[in-house]
Amino acid sequence: MTALTVSRVLFVCLLINEAVVLARTPPEERKRVIMPRAMPLPVLLLLAPFFFALELPGGWGWWAAFVQALGLGMEIAGELQLARAQSFSMSANLPAQPQTTGLYRRLENPIYVAILLQLLAWAAWMPVAFIAVAMQLESFRRMVREERKYLARLAVSHRGADSFLWN
């Protein structure tokens, strides 16, 4: 099995995880989710490595697959932590209680960081996909602004090592 094959399988796992999260989200909450602008473009760009992939030199392909696996594990761990606390929400103004333990002890938004790690590693196979990563980062920044507004209303401030990404 090649690194590219492993990377493709991990990307499909990311897509399946996102589909499950979306399917479990109530329709009224789904309407409030902030998506990347021009949504079809990032989707098409992220599909590019399935059809056109660069040959990554040396062990870089395995490094990309490792980063994707790390990101997927981190994303699932963050989702499980929020689910256990009954605080998981796809929109910015619904979490019942902000988290400050586990992954959230060090990171403001570990799920967003995990998704970005996965997308960055995936985009290494076809650099045009980095445009989609930039578009996703921009939508995460808009989402974090909304989350911070919501937390301010609760008189809660939470920042982490990743906070510079969202400013």
Image (cartoon, helix red, strand yellow):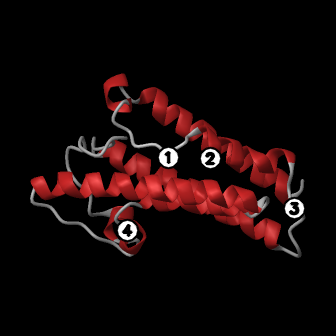
Tell me the kind of residue under disc 2.
Answer: Pro
Q: How far apart in space, not on screen, are marks 4 and 3 (Cα)? A: 32 Å
Q: Is mark 4 on a helix, strand or loop?
A: loop
Q: Mark 4 points at which residue?
A: 107
Q: How far apart are marks 3 and 2 (CA)?
A: 19 Å
Question: Residue at horizontal 70%, vertical 42%?
Answer: 44
Q: Residues within 10 Å of mark 4 (few under 14, many from 20)?
A: some
- The amino acid beneath tag 3 is Leu
- Quadrant containing the C terminus in the rendered view: bottom left
Q: Mark 1 = which residue?
A: 36
Q: Does the residue at mark 4 contact the one at mark 2 (Cβ under 8 Å)?
A: no
Q: Which amino acid does label 1 sit on?
A: Pro
- The front one of 4 and 149 is 149
- The image quarter containing residue 90 is top left
Q: What is the secondary structure assignment of the residue under circle 2?
A: helix
Q: Picture coordinates of residue 56 (x, y %)?
A: 86, 68
Amino acid beneath label 4: Leu
- Which residue is situated farthest in the top direction here? 27
Q: Earlier in the sequence, mark 4 or mark 1?
A: 1
Residue pointed to by mark 2:
42
- Please report whichever mark, 4 or 2, sits nearer to the chain's N-terminal start: 2
| Residue 122 in sight from this viewpoint | no
Decide which of 81, 53 is in the foreground and name it: 53
Instruction: Give the alpha-carbon distance from disc 3 to disc 1, as whole Å.
Output: 26 Å
Residue 29 higher or lower than 108, as above or below:
above
Pointers 1 and 2 in contact (C-beta within 8 Å): yes
Say the numbered circle drawn on residue 54: 3
Looking at the image, residue 90 lies above or below residue 161? above
Separation of marks 4 and 2 at Cα, in angstroms = 25 Å
Label 3 packing within 10 angstroms: few (<14), some (14-19), many (20+): few
Query: Residue 144, located in which quarter of the rendered image?
Result: bottom left
Above or below, 108 against 29 in this view is below
